[in-house]
């Protein structure tokens, strides 16, 4: 036990130091976490192993991370431009998936390997988009909200696709099974949304008691997150769906009429407390684990594939997300900004490939390729946005 604690302390210390260095260069700290995981993992130093305690801590961190992602989403904000936001999110996923899927097939990969690689690289990281939007000055707030909203739609699609991957692992990919799984997801989501709305409108006094102090808020939230994660698992879905919807349900407290803004302040307080937990401990451990699973199976033969995947993953988002904006708003600058803002990859991509690797859906070689592509895009995302902003000022 003492050895494991020592390993966690050293890993977190190195990850935080590198993360702060990268943050100054507008690079998301998760890059540092993954790189330290690779350094300390079996590939290089062998200081950390993927089995045992770190795996459980990483799973715990992922559930809390998905709960937090749902908590920080505001259904009302998304509803204002829901049509354009949904279209932008779906278009970005579809174009990116098609480009990468066809390229993988053209490079000689099998059907399912091509599907999984395309799925894993078709999502935008909400956390990365949120950070680079926060740093983007002088840009229309509505455009920023479209980027965040579209990345949220990406998250929902990614969670749905993760759940379908669970079906694939059982060897049941018949149309009726896929339809039933899709229906389960829709029913589960609608049930949580309906019940949360009912609780918010009919059980206000109970809510006030449960959320009357920060410790109660955090305890209640963790219980809700893991209860819904378990409910999702029992329904044959992925735990991530339940955790995400748990956060979304709690976020609906913002809808209670409250002239004193008490509920909004409580939600913000809960978000800040969870953010501290995540940034200081849980999220770094998850991404350290992602890095520990890296196998260093790449060689010079994979350079062409890596360059193609990185390029197409970026182009797919710029074109796929930017086109609906161009058609609706008739503004090339806004179109390029939204597309560039959707380039970043992050937590969910890592979750998908970790899940796929454990389920033997992809080989360690493909895991390394996807992870390298994700890391590169996370680094390039703020740089691409800066370049686009400079170019659009000249248009």
Image (spheres, rainbow, N blue to C red):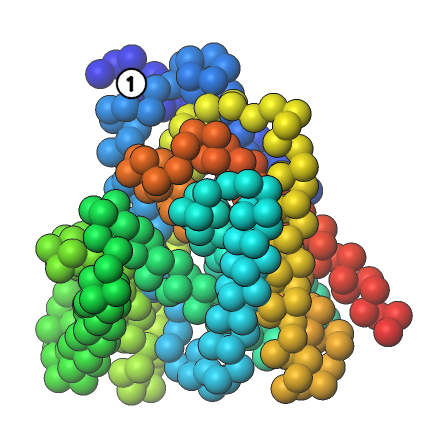
Q: Which one is nearer the viewer's eye here, 393 or 188?
A: 188
Residue 99 vertical placement versus 7 (above, below) = below
Identify the image quadrant of residue 135. Answer: bottom right
Question: Would you call the spot at circle 1 few (<14 residues within 10 Å), some (14-19), or many (20 or more)?
Answer: few
Residue 282 vertical placement versus 244 (above, below) = above
Q: Which one is nearer the viewer's eye here, 136 or 312?
A: 312
Residue 359 spot, x, y in % from top left: 29, 38
Q: Residue at x 33, y 24 (%)?
A: 50
Q: How many marks?
A: 1
Q: Residue at x 29, y 13 (%)?
A: 3
Q: Is residue 281 visible?
A: no
Q: Is residue 80 left or right of residue 6?
A: right
Identify the image quadrant of residue 77. Answer: bottom left
Q: Residue at x 25, y 14 (%)?
A: 2
Residue 152 spot, x, y in % from top left: 44, 66
Q: Is residue 159 left or right of residue 394?
A: left
Position of the N terminus by quadrant: top left
Query: Which residue is disc 1 drawn over?
Result: 4
Q: Is residue 237 visible?
A: yes
Q: Secondary structure at mark 1?
A: helix
Residue 200 spot, x, y in % from top left: 20, 79
Q: Residue at x 24, y 60 (%)?
A: 174
Residue 202 spot, x, y in % from top left: 13, 84
């Amino acid at each position: 036990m003492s050895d494991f604690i020592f390993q966690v302390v050293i890993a977190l210390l190195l990850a935080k130091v590198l993360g702060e260095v990268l943050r100054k260069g507008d690079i998301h700290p998760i890059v540092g976490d993954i790189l330290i995981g690779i350094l300390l993992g079996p590939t290089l130093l062998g200081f950390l192993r993927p089995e045992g305690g770190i795996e459980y801590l990483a799973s715990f961190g992922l559930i809390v991370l998905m709960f937090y992602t749902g908590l920080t989403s505001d259904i009302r904000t998304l509803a204002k431009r829901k049509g354009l936001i949904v279209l932008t999110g779906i278009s970005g996923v579809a174009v990116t998936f098609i480009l990468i899927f066809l390229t993988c097939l053209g490079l000689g990969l099998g059907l399912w390997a091509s599907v999984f690689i395309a799925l894993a690289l078709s999502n935008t990281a909400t956390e990365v988009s949120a950070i680079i939007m926060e740093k983007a000055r002088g840009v229309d707030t509505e455009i920023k909200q479209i980027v965040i909203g579209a990345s949220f739609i990406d998250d929902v699609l990614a969670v749905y696709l993760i759940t379908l991957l669970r079906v694939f692992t059982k060897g049941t990919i018949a149309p009726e099974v896929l339809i039933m799984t899709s229906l389960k997801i829709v029913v589960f989501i609608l049930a949580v949304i309906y019940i949360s709305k009912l609780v918010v409108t009919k059980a206000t006094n109970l809510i006030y008691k449960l959320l009357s102090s920060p410790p109660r808020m955090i305890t209640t939230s963790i219980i809700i997150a893991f209860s819904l994660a378990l409910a999702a698992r029992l329904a044959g879905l992925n735990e991530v769906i339940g955790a995400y919807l748990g956060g979304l349900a709690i976020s609906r407290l913002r809808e209670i009429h409250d002239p004193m803004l008490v509920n909004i302040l409580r939600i913000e307080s809960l978000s800040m407390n969870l953010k501290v937990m995540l940034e200081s401990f849980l999220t770094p451990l998850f991404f350290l684990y992602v890095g520990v699973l890296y196998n260093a199976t790449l060689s010079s033969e994979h350079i062409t594939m890596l360059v193609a995947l990185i390029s197409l993953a970026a182009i797919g988002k710029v074109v796929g997300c930017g086109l609906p904006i161009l058609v609706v708003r008739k503004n090339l600058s806004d179109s390029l900004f939204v597309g560039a803002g959707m380039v970043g990859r992050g937590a969910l991509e890592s979750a998908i490939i970790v899940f796929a690797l454990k389920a033997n859906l992809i080989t360690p070689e493909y895991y390394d390729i996807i992870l390298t592509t994700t890391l590169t895009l996370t680094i390039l995302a703020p740089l691409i946005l800066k370049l686009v902003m400079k170019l659009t000022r000249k248009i």
